[in-house]
Image: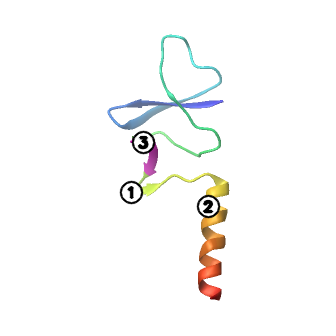
Amino acid sequence: MNIAIVANGVVVNIIVGPLPDDMSGVALGDRPVAIGDSYADGVFTRSGEVVMTPAEKIAALEARIAELEA
């Protein structure tokens, strides 16, 4: 499991594997978070945009296609 280490609202490291007992972090699942991304209120952002999972990106694109076809 990938875990983001966040300090002052910014991702400062990504740990792959189990988190050491003396550390705290945020589990990423399949969210492609990178060092330097922001984290606030349970949401990761990059350049002001929410960092979406691949499934969320696909759903957003499908919704946009449906809008354009309507």
Sooner in the amino-acid sequence: mark 1 or mark 2: 1
Q: Quadrant of the N terminus?
A: top right
Whether residue 64 is situated above or below residue 22 in the rendered picture:
below
Q: Quadrant of the C terminus?
A: bottom right
Q: Nearer the viewer, mark 2 or mark 3?
A: 2
Q: CA distance from mark 2 to mark 3?
A: 21 Å
Nearer to me, 42 or 13: 42
Question: Farthest residue toward the top?
Answer: 22
Q: Please, what is the three-letter code of the amino acid marked with disc 2?
A: Lys
Determine which residue is flagged by label 2.
Answer: 57
Q: Looking at the picture, how far across and down is residue 53, in whole percent?
A: 61, 51
Q: Measuring 63% from the left and 38% from the top, which residue is drawn there?
A: 29
Question: Farthest residue toward the left?
Answer: 8
Q: Please, what is the three-letter code of the amino acid marked with disc 1?
A: Gly
Q: Is residue 66 magenta?
A: no
Question: Farthest residue toward the front?
Answer: 70
Q: Measuring 65% from the left and 80% from the top, which residue is drawn there?
A: 66
Whether residue 51 is situated above or below residue 34 in the rendered picture:
below
14 sits left or right of 9 in the view: right
Determine which residue is flagged by label 3.
Answer: 36
Q: For mark 2, give the secondary structure.
A: helix
Q: Please, what is the three-letter code of the amino acid marked with disc 3?
A: Gly
Q: Looking at the picture, how far across and down is residue 12, in whole percent?
A: 43, 32
Which quarter of the picture shows residue 37? Answer: top left
Label ID, residue 48? 1
Which region is colored magenta? Answer: 40-45
Q: Measuring 58% from the left and 19% from the top, which residue is drawn there?
A: 19
Q: Is residue 43 magenta?
A: yes
Q: CA distance from mark 1 to mark 2?
A: 16 Å
59 sits left or right of 11 in the view: right
Whether residue 38 is situated above or below residue 55 in the rendered picture:
above
50 sits left or right of 48 in the view: right
